[in-house]
Amino acid sequence: MSQIPITVRGDVDARAVEQLQRCATAGGAVAGVLCADGHVGYSQPIGGAIAYPDHVSPSGVGYDIGCGNKAVRTDLRTDDVRADVPRIMDAIYESVSFGMGRKNDEPVDHPVLDAIRHADFRPQRSMVQKAANQLGTVGAGNHYVDLFAGDDGFLWVGVHFGSRGFGHKTASGFLSMAAGGGFKDRVRDGEMDAPPVLFAIDSEIGQSYVAAMELAGAYAHAGRDVVVDKVLEILGASATHTVHNHHNYAWRERHLGVDAWVVRKGCTPAFPGQEGFVGASMGEASVILRGREDADTDLLLASTVHGAGRVMSRTQAAGRIANRMECSDRGCDFWVSMGQFRDALERAGAERDRFTLCPDHPDGRMVKRRGRVKAGSIDFAAVQAALATDGIELRGGAADEAPAAYKRLDEVVAAHADSVEVLHRLVPIGVAMAAADTVDPYKD
């Protein structure tokens, strides 16, 4: 058992706590915290923060460097735009690029791109075109653009995403170098319970990682600015208040009398007086939080939740999508797994193009298509109907992001009530996400 102080809030998986202890011990941490939305992640758990005096951890920050949330209160009253929300959501979904690897059809010039062209860590310079293409795109998974009815009567806009391919390639490159490879080499995915990758902060690679991480964070911050500005343009509105935070990042901070690198993976910074935007699931209220002025933040590393926290894996929720062999008749729903088809074909000694297992179309053939090969626990059609009944306009989305796949946000926030207070509840009235059956490799 680690002697390093580990603070755990809420009802979290024991395996996630073990991950946090392992990471803290390996780097001689000052302290660690697992927030109430915590769950198992790659090496360091999501919802976990660790303070290392002499190290920084690329596996701790994760692949989506600088992933975070931005929320703005607009100058529009919700009641004045509510009837127009369907049209607004259509315009957002058509104007903002959602999904894996998507490209911004309206490339923007931004100072962060010039910073990438002249990056201190030279290998990042070659990624400027990819960065330009994806600036202002949202990605997939649990990343979104939402409209909210604030409890103050005003319309709010909220977004959640990170540094896209630029951050992912940056993280992959450093993990490859840590394993003895080159920055552009492919790195094998590690085991979920692998020890953390740590760089001594006074080493050349440690200093290079910090510079590269900070640039990826600036890119993520800029991307959220671009998307929010686009939504404000669609609304014809101005922002009257802004809350903007990373939650996958490392900062140099002072806790328990020690200067340390606080590596947060899925943790919102929450120093006394600091505001944070924390999103819930697609069907529940999000919140604007603020660190309590009288809170003792040291053992919590001034950290709080970044979302509701998953209780169901994506595969459990939505099932599994993979290649399968389907009847070529588009009106037929017959299919078999690739293995079943290959075995049957070999036993029959038949030609692939003239062979079918479909009992309803014996003269047809089988074609390879992507489809669901394992059923999920969530009926997404029922979820969509419930959201519509609640007055929420959904664009995109999938079963793996349904409310039942998550904890309840009010419960996880309540577990941190001694350190944060809720300033505003934001009820979703429009939710835009990537289309179904996509998973973003850059998610937090």
Image (cartoon, rainbow, N blue to C red):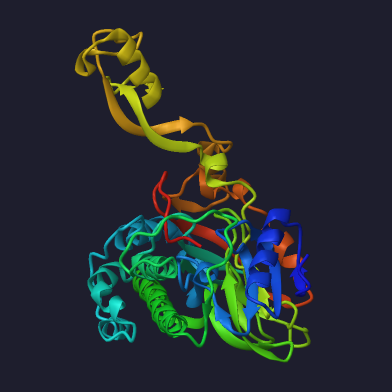
The quadrant where residue 299 appears = bottom right
Eyeballing the image, is 252 above or below 228? below
Question: Can residue 13 be seen in this snapshot?
Answer: no
Residue 77 image point, x, y percent: 51, 72
Residue 127 or residue 376, whichever sits in front = 127
Q: Is residue 106 left or right of residue 250?
A: left
Picture coordinates of residue 233, whole percent (x, y): 34, 73
Question: Does residue 374 sit above or below 53 in this rendering?
Answer: above
Residue nearer the viewer, 295 or 288: 295
Q: Is residue 367 visible?
A: yes
Could you say where residue 431 lies in the image, as x and y percent from the top left?
Answer: 47, 57
Question: At x 41% / y 84%, what residue is drawn?
Answer: 211
Q: Residue at x 79, y 76 (%)?
A: 418
Closer to the camera in the image, 204 or 328: 204
Q: Quadrant of the N terminus?
A: bottom right
Nearer to me, 36 or 86: 36
Whole-percent x and y of residue 194?
57, 59
